[in-house]
Image (cartoon, grey):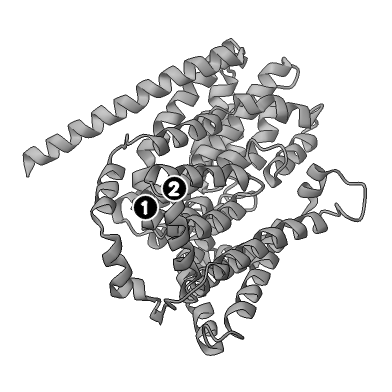
Amino acid sequence: MDYGWLSIVPPMVAMLLVLITKEVLFSLFMGVLSGALIYEKWNLVYGLRTTFEAITRGMADMQHVEILVFLGLLGALVVILTVAGGAQAYGDWAVKRIKTKRQSQLMTCFCGLLFCIDDFFHFLAASVIMKPVMERNKVSSEKFAYLLDSTAATTSVIAPISGWAAVIVSLLTKSNVESPMGVFIKGIPFNLYAILTILTVFFFSVSKFELGGMAAAEKRAERKSVVAERTDTAAEEVEGLAINKNGKIIYMILPICVLVFGSVLWILGTGEYFTSSTSLLTAIGKAEMGESLIVGSFFAIVAALCLVVPTKVVSLKIFMESFVAGVKTMIPAILILILAWAIGDICGQEHLNTGSFVKEVLSASISEHLFPIIMFVVSCFLSFATGTSWGTFGIFIPIAADLCNGLSDNILVISVAATLAGAVFGDHVSPISGTTVMASTGAGCDHLKHVSTQMPYALPVAFASAIGFLVAGFWGNIFVVLGVSLVVLVGSIYAVKIMLKSKEKLEQSYE
């Protein structure tokens, strides 16, 4: 059955309710329910049944299960390292060497470049390593979440050796594109959203230029007393468990090293890199990413156990209580992901088939020069609405290949790059995106505060990217495209700054 415009109702309902109620879980559930009711022709009983079937299918998917287990282990590892005193000891050590906000923010950006092999791996490693440093240097949790989020998918999507590259190349191969790896490599400079986001992240890290609510968040962080934070109840306990004040930095460093090397070795092992003549890129593409992250996290927890329990830093009882408490901290993030997957299921081919509807709309007679900007805008919308960049890749890379069939290679390269850029933007800013949830969770930031404070930073980049893709469709010279995009970006950032200041003054005049 063709549901037409009704097929986009579930994500729209979720988005609108999030903005109105500020309740993410309720909004997501209502989005799933609305789609189920449309599918079941407004029969409430069948609609509820379809809703819960979509939820359970999301939890039954093995890749999703791996992500949920990984999140639980991530929470457990963070609390264990904190209770053992390793996080505080590392913070004491790092704050003596990373002494300014600028240095700590730049270090977070470089972590994004270093851990570009996978976005979830980036969140796990960077959040644990940098959180103590960011707190000591009075960087707000909102700014930390923005830096984490903006250096995750944006670096992974343009890294030739990453799980993302392997997925993209495989989709291009299935779409009968000649030289799929060549198309991906040539498209890296045209992935405007990723490149411009990375540039802006470094700019906002070295400057004191802030936009909107982020400026207020940074001022609040500046007013906090580091001494007070270390002596109050919040600093002495985490999840009701007393923090060991005599912790050593090894309690932090060794588990993190085990996590990193264990995950990488397992990635290469499951990709058959050690047992065959498989290339590094092919091995990463074949690897079990979720399984590798779970294994790395598990061995990191085992390493922490061997460090702190035999030496009586903490008792086995406290260690296990820390483990359970850490898993509990991830429950809100886990619930958001489960409902986000359910919306994706309702919008999938077995139900409302949103992707086919969008493809029909795009199949109308349009100029080939407009393909890049159209693919960018529509990918932005779908990724934002569904909260998944990979799902958007799966839908729109074949569409881009079909639309550009028989046209110049340059239009294909730019259109594919525009699709990737749009998908990453939607994933970056969507409140129901897994990466957005991971960023706010890793930074210890309220989820909706992260979404609202990040938006003024992302929208100017998206606008500049759209103009860049419009230019690229007519004139595919990368230097011209980047030059125009950078000029528009600078102007857009200052325009947003002026508009937000005017809004703030207007609100103050009414008070």
The spot of residue 499 in percent (x, y) is: 24, 29
Q: Are marks 1 and 2 in contact (CB under 8 Å)?
A: yes
**Which residue: 30% across, 56% down?**
21
Q: Is residue 403 left or right of residue 384?
A: right
Q: Is residue 298 left or right of residue 486?
A: right
Q: Nearer the viewer, residue 68 or 32?
A: 68
The spot of residue 285 in percent (x, y) is: 77, 47
Question: In this orientation, does residue 56 appear?
Answer: no
**Which residue: 62% across, 66% down?**
254
The furthest residue to the top: 475
Q: Is residue 34 left or right of residue 21?
A: right
Q: Is residue 31 above or below residue 181?
A: below
The furthest residue to the front: 96
Query: How many C-alpha atoms fall within 10 Å of the one at disc 1: few (<14), some, or many (≥20)?
Result: many
Q: Amino acid at mark 2?
A: Ser
Residue at mark 2: 104
Q: Nearer the viewer, residue 260 or 273?
A: 260
Residue at mark 1: 137
Q: Amino acid at mark 1?
A: Asn
